[in-house]
Image (cartoon, coloured by chain):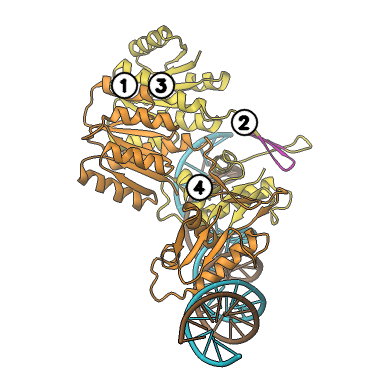
Chain colours: A yellow, B orange, C brown, D cyan
Amino acid sequence: MSRVLIVDDEHSLLRALAMNLVARGYTVTEADTGTKALTAVAGDPYDAIVLDLGLPDISGLDVIRAVREFGTTPIIVLSARTGSSDKVQALNLGADDYVSKPFSMEELLARLRATTRRASTVDTAQTAAVGQMQIDLAAKTVTQPDGARVHLTPTEWHLLEVLLRQPGKLVTSRTLLTELRGAPEHTDPSYLRIYMAQLRRKLEPEPSRPRHLITEPGMGYRFQP
Amino acid sequence: MSRVLIVDDEHSLLRALAMNLVARGYTVTEADTGTKALTAVAGDPYDAIVLDLGLPDISGLDVIRAVREFGTTPIIVLSARTGSSDKVQALNLGADDYVSKPFSMEELLARLRATTRRASTVDTAQTAAVGQMQIDLAAKTVTQPDGARVHLTPTEWHLLEVLLRQPGKLVTSRTLLTELRGAPEHTDPSYLRIYMAQLRRKLEPEPSRPRHLITEPGMGYRFQP
DNA sequence: GGCCGTCCTCACGAGATCGTCACGATGCCC
DNA sequence: GGGCATCGTGACGATCTCGTGAGGACGGCC
């Protein structure tokens, strides 16, 4: 059934979680540090990650960031903190849910089900083509026809991913800014233009005459397959 | 941008939520009973539903059930109860997230973003046909029979959208001008004619003999499917 | 400390959109 | 048929938006 990665430095909790999940039919991998978690994620694919924020080595937020660099695996955050700013930060970084300790096992299981249910409807096609370029969202690679690699920065990936997720669909500048920044207010739309320009320069054969990363004046941008 | 339905019988909270969401650029519909919520959902498509469990007429759980009969619109549940069995029940019925009152506005907004981000990959193509043209309001695309795309400006889309929302129904010039400009007074009705002409030129096979974008002299315009 | 990559802002020319004017066409009423 | 109101269309500057280059701020790494 589903493969779940549990990350927590509290061994008793780790054990309890694992036992409950295994009893429910999940395949469980455990990690008690951020480093171990990241190597696990890099090695195997998971259907969901349950992540405690208070890790001894790496900040849990950095783990979220790193996982989101790779892909879109659902992340449920556990935390002893109940402050709303922590929640907002984690969710904005790409976490799917946030559960405050202490929590009931039933609730966590229900949230896990809700999250994976939603994620399973997402198509898993992770590669796309922009002209001659081959793009692999999962591996985060862009390959030219001659085999050479093109390097994209995290922000560029984020932008490209949002556009590629909805092929042919218009994405408003507001949506893009919200994805990149968290809030569209008081953010200069020219910010977007710089990154679109950089993406085009790296992906389009003729950056000044884009054929796939299309501008819709006054509205936003569109990825044309 | 995103259309959100808020359901709560506490009017002060309803208002506060609506104001915050509108300020963030969401299009908001309010409902203070389960019945009104269900008619709203049946009538218009939404990108997310924020639902209080404690409603005067129908149980919130039944609302979740009914909405899930229809489709997969993301649902965020609000509740004064903190018991885990309530959460489990709501989530199992198909809710995407559960927030206990009291909550911070920032947290709700973050969870709303996380939920719609996850759900946005699922297609909700709502397309209409004008003659041979295929129109997708969500993707903002107009496709000709041969596959070629037609480009529409923001104002043209706005006008077309208002007409398409009420198929066959007459829409007065006053309504159209209010939609496009904000105020119908002191605005030349000839303004409308220019954009209707442009729309017809782009959508109708014979712009001078329109078959779908019909003029009703002295009253307004009508979209004939 | 120095280097490097990334993020983000500012400023300016180019291009698209908007909104108005003018003029001809159409249909209705007397 | 004449007069009048309403509508359709072409053209043109004002305005807004977009693309691009240059450059400072910040943080990680050697």
Which label belongs to residue A112? 3
| Residue at mark 2 to residue at mark 1: CA–CA distance | 34 Å
User: Which label lies toward us, 1 or 4?
Assistant: 1
Report crowding for label 1: few under 14, some 14 to 19, many 20 or more residues within 10 A (C-alpha): some
Subunit ID for the residue under disc 2: A
- Three-letter residue code for mark 2: Gln
Q: Are marks 1 and 4 on the same chain?
A: no
Gap between marks 3 and 4, in whole Å? Answer: 28 Å
Quickly name the residue at label 2: A126
Look at the numbered disc 2 and give the secondary structure of its residue.
Answer: loop
Instruction: Decide if residue A184 is on the left or right side of residue B164.
Output: left
Left or right of B12 on screen, residue B175: right
Residue A176 badge: 4
Residue B175 vs B15, above or below: the answer is: below
Name the side, left or right, on which B66 lies relative to C20: left
Q: Where is residue B101 drawn, in percent x and y?
A: 23, 34
What amino acid type is highlighted by mark number 3?
Leu
Q: Main secondary structure of the magenta part?
A: strand
Q: Which mark is residue B89?
A: 1
Considering depth in this image, is B177 or A72 the residue closer to the camera?
B177
* Range covered by the magenta-colored residues: A128-143
SS assignment at label 3 = helix
Q: Tell me if residue B61 is in the magenta stretch.
A: no
State the separation of the CA atoms marked 1 and 3. Answer: 13 Å
